[in-house]
Image (cartoon, grey):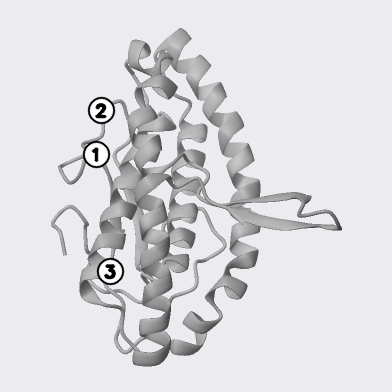
């Protein structure tokens, strides 16, 4: 476990996956905010953009239409998806997530939290490539062992309601980020209500992604709040 992932004292009244973002509302860096989508491109390529999971409808083949699930999670996100597939078999048949693979998946997710916080204007500091101190981070308690094989076996099905809600929230988050971009560039300040909404969606989407990557078995709450 890297020191870059914060671990809280175990409290079963608090969800074991959370994000911790230091507020930055006033005296923002207008210049870097103005060019934020360009500056964030290297991180987007590696760990993806803010919409962790999105639902899209389209035609597949010559007959019929259906739903397709996609994830804009970058190169490291593709690696994490492969790790989750391996872990699925390991947990279903052995009851445990291989420790090295778990650490690698967490490494991706905490990098993603920092990059998304930067892209969505929650912070102005440029994220590190890899592990280093940053004012936006992942909070994650390791899961209990042995793991819950039943919920892991049906994880994709169980996560469908969460993915739909996150996809809808991500649309609102995109709109609010544009409003924040204009506000910061013009006034140098970020609206507090939109900041709280952005952190809330980041929290919710991170919990869902951690659930899908099998990093934890506790079902994400339908809430933007840190509980």
Quadrant of image for the N terminus: bottom left
Q: Nearer the N terminus, badge 2 or badge 3?
A: 3
Give the image location of residue 44, x and y in percent.
40, 36
Quadrant of image for the C terminus: bottom left
Q: Tell me: 205 left or right of 40.
A: right
Asked if disc 3 and disc 1 are in contact, CB closer than 8 Å, the reply is no
Q: 124 above or below 219? A: above
| Element carrying mark 2 | loop
Pointer 2: what residue? 125
| Any part of residue 15 in sight | no
Asked if disc 1 and disc 2 are in contact, CB closer than 8 Å, the reply is yes
Residue appearing at x 75%, y 50% in the figure: 57
Q: Which mark is residue 199?
A: none
Q: 208 above or below 108? A: below
Q: Nearer the N terminus, badge 3 or badge 1?
A: 3
State how far apart marks 2 and 3 are (Cα): 28 Å
State how far apart marks 3 and 1 are (Cα): 23 Å
Foreground: disc 1 or disc 2: 2
Residue appearing at x 38%, y 28% in the figure: 41
Pointer 1: what residue? 135
Foreground: disc 3 or disc 1: 3
Is 153 in front, or is 18? 153
Q: Which mark is residue 102?
A: 3
């Amino acid at each position: 476990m890297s020191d870059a992932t914060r671990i809280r004292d175990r409290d079963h009244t608090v969800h074991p996956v959370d994000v911790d973002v230091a507020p930055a509302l006033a005296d923002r860096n207008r210049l870097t905010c103005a060019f934020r989508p360009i500056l964030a491109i290297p991180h987007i390529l590696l760990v993806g953009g803010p919409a962790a999971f999105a639902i899209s409808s389209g035609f597949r083949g010559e007959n019929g239409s259906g739903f397709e699930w996609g994830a804009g999670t970058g190169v490291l996100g593709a690696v994490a998806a492969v790790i989750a597939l391996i872990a699925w078999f390991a947990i279903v048949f052995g009851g445990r997530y291989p420790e090295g693979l778990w650490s690698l998946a967490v490494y991706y997710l905490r990098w993603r939290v920092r990059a998304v916080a930067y892209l969505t204007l929650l912070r102005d500091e440029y994220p590190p490539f890899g592990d280093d101190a940053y004012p936006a981070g992942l909070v994650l308690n390791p899961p209990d062992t042995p793991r819950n094989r039943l919920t892991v076996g049906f994880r994709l099905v169980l996560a469908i309601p969460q993915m739909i809600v996150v996809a809808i929230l991500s649309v609102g988050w995109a709109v609010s980020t544009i409003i924040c971009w204009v506000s910061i560039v013009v006034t140098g300040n970020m609206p507090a209500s939109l900041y709280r909404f952005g952190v809330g969606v980041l929290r919710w989407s991170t919990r869902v992604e951690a659930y899908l990557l099998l990093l934890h078995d506790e079902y994400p709450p339908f809430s933007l709040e840190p509980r």
